[in-house]
Image: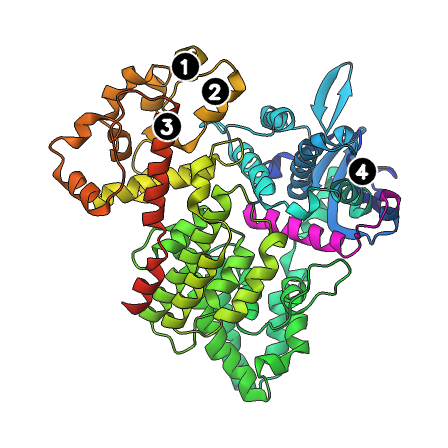
Amino acid sequence: MDQVSSKIEAKDYSISDVLSNKKYTIDYFQREYKWQQRHIEQLIADLETSFTLNYEEKHERSDVANYNSYYLGPIVLSNKDGKKSVIDGQQRLTSLTILLIYLNNLQQNHAEKVKLDTLIYSETYGQKSFNLDVPERRHCLDALYTKGEYEVKDTDDETVKNIAARYNDIAELFPDELKGRALPFFIDWLIQNVVLVVIIAYSDDNAYTIFETMNDRGLNLTPSEMLKGYLLSKVRTQEQRDKINEVWKREIKGLHELWDEADISFFQAWLRAKYAVTIRPGKAGSANEDFEKIGTRFHTWVKDNTDKIKLNNPTDFYSLVNTNIVFYMKVFTKIYKARGVLQKNVEHLYYSQQWGFASSLADPLLLAPIGISDNEETIDKKLNLVARFIETFSLYRGVNYRNFSQSSIRYTMYNLVLELRDKTVAELGKILAQKLADIEENLDGILSLGMHGQNKHFIKFILSRITAHIEQKSGKSTSFETYFNNPDGKPFEIEHIWADKLEYHADEFTQVHEFNEIRNRLGDLILLPRGTNQSFGAGKYEEKLPHYIKENLLAQSLNTVCYERNPNFLAYVSESGLPFKAHSQYKTEDLKIRQALYKSIGEEIWSLDFFSQESTN
């Protein structure tokens, strides 16, 4: 190996230095982009927290140069024949690219803009190519860059689907507080003050050696392993240490069957749920408190807060692992399994997982009321009550176009954790119902709710809940899963009742944007199986109407035939008093009437009576 090929460089660079007018390929063995929402959530939360520790309204943009730096981690590159290939760090670089595309779209209506184009793509001889140059991704990244949305196709691979989903996560989670005056400050800070350590090897052999060394888990203790070491060191006898060491390994292995870093999420959620007391205020410059410290270095927090955990002697340390941690790990596992499969008695864990705020806020809320002596029935009731609160709270915000950025609801939810801690089922129901009753937003937002690029998932969630609800009330065996995922058949898609034909509605509209705004309202939307949707989607309403009677009950209810010889449905309509009606034509007024019906169904589904009924049964 010559002197150049054996060379290795390591240096810290800003994001601007790493990406501006650069071109990277991604090595074949780590081609897929696999980050999930929890990773994006953590990234945005960390960036927002670090930035707001410095930012003040009185600052000028030049002051950002004096803000603290933030270390984002290392990346490993192979530089061979002048071409740079990403050996390690493509998850981070891809996520940064998606974030930069989002920020570039977000700042378009701002007077002050930060030039981001060259960090996203480079241009040679008039040809634009993205700085992370992977052919399979180009069409998705181009759509996100030019339109701010990408419609996922069946033929798309895992990476493209994840890129589109993570862009939507960023749009959902990005803090409102950073969208106004602070936006150019944040972008300046992100691209100039956020640092990556770039390790460059000039041969593939050296690059892979570095990659393997950095990813050898045996060389790096995780926070969970450091916590274990501390707790075991405080136990009195070797016999007890050996016993709880085996317990620990068994339980951590179970958590890792959920996902690789589930143990980290568990300890953060459990310590916040049961022991954290103080919360960092939202104002700039405030120091981190219990809830925030647990999120960054929970193993250190435990050492510094043995009084809050009531660890006074070796027996307490032994019991904490052998009893408390084991118990709450099982509850945590139950939560995540119920989020993945619709289950009776805890169905709202499944619903709230499909559309709701970040798990780092939801998990402590769910664990907070659970007591060590609670039986399975009590645990299920408490989990279902809290999950129903999360679902309803998220719905209130969603239908009123409010996002779920961690910063916007963090302080509220951490305080709620303190209120819910160790409450009985009856106490829990009262607290949660009152919290929802006190919220300024409610389901009135459904009356003006429309579909746009970033909320299609949410709209499908609402339509799936409404469709399944009225069918179950009418004696059918379909479920929310049938319409939202339909694992056993054709997937359902959102169907516009109005075709995308302005000429069909020339008596009401002359402007395309006015027509599109009304056409995308919730009242113009139903769910149909893929293929059915495409086969007559361009037809006039009068042409579609006879076909709807063959579909789900929500679609059928547009047709007069639905109200003939349909005793179970008619009994449900009579008992509920819901304003169902057939529509022989579908004008704007009909659409508004239909949207009001959806609101009424929603009020039945998400009635606050649930909390008193569930807590007294």
Say few, some or many: other residues with alpha carbon within 10 Å of mark 4 (under 14 / 14 to 19 / 20 or more). some
* Amino acid carrying mark 4 in the image: Ser
- 441 above or below 513? below
Label located before the other in sequence (3 or 2): 2
Q: What amino acid is found at the position of numbered circle 3 in the picture?
A: Leu
Separation of marks 1 and 4 at Cα, in angstroms = 50 Å
Q: Regarding mark 3 in the picture, which secondary structure is present there?
A: helix
Mark sitting earlier along the chain (2/1): 1
**Where's residue 352, x and y in %?**
43, 51
- The residue beneath circle 4 is 16
Residue 70, position in %: x, y?
77, 52
Q: Are marks 1 and 3 in contact (CB under 8 Å)?
A: no
Q: Which residue is mark 1?
A: 505
Q: Tell me which numbered mark, 1 or 3, is placed earlier along the sequence.
A: 1
Which image quadrant is residue 208 in? top right
Q: Residues within 10 Å of mark 2 (few under 14, many from 20)?
A: some
